Image: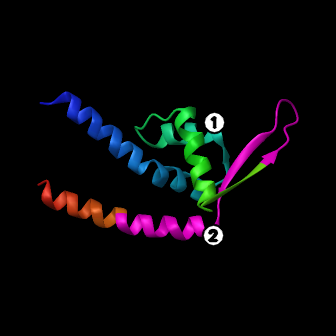
């Protein structure tokens, strides 16, 4: 087995699906950054770091897929909460259609 190749491949798959995962998490609720990380860890086997999440959230925001707002806390610093935009919801639907078709194709070919 070529472990280096497999490691690089896993990294690329993770990078390519992270936006899909984050949008799916935001589909159900609004979250601030650390909560998003916790939700991804809780619901997947993917480890995500803050240094990966925040640049991704900024890209999603530039694409008008998510929006953010600062929320004051009773104690401590304000938190930035992220939610899906209507464009984000529509984009996620299209991503899911593609993902489902891809999953079927991969299952067929990898039997």
Q: Which residue is mark 2?
A: 86
Task: Check the image and tell me how it is coloured.
Answer: rainbow
Q: Which residue is mark 1?
A: 34
Residue 11 rendering spot, x and y as whole percentages = 34, 38
**Mark 1 to mark 2 CA distance (whole Å):** 23 Å
Which residue is located at x 43 percent, y 42 percent? Answer: 44
Q: Quadrant of residue 51?
A: top right
Question: 10 Å neighbourhood of mark 2: few (<14), some, or many (≥20)?
Answer: few
Picture disc at residue 98? none
Which residue is located at x 14 percent, y 53 percent? Answer: 110
Which quadrant of the rendered structure holds the N terminus? top left
Which quadrant of the rendered structure holds the C terminus? bottom left
In this rendering, position of residue 100 left or right of residue 67: left
- Identify the element where label 1 is drawn: helix
Residue 59 rendering spot, x and y as whole percentages = 57, 51
Q: Quadrant of residue 71?
A: top right
Q: Is residue 62 visible?
A: yes
- Say above or below: 88 vs 4: below
**Region of the chain picked out in magenta, as a range:** 70-98
In this rendering, position of residue 93 left or right of residue 8: right
- Identify the element where label 2 is drawn: helix
């Amino acid at each position: 087995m070529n472990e280096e190749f497999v490691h690089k491949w896993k990294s690329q798959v993770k990078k390519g699906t992270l936006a899909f995962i984050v949008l799916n998490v935001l589909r159900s609720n609004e979250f601030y950054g650390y909560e998003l990380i916790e939700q991804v860890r809780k619901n997947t086997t993917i480890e995500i770091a803050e240094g990966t999440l925040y640049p991704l959230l900024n890209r999603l925001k530039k694409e008008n897929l998510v929006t953010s707002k600062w929320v004051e806390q009773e104690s401590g610093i304000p938190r930035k909460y992220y939610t899906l935009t209507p464009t984000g919801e529509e984009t996620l639907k299209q991503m899911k259609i593609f993902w489902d078709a891809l999953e079927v194709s991969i299952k067929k070919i990898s039997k």
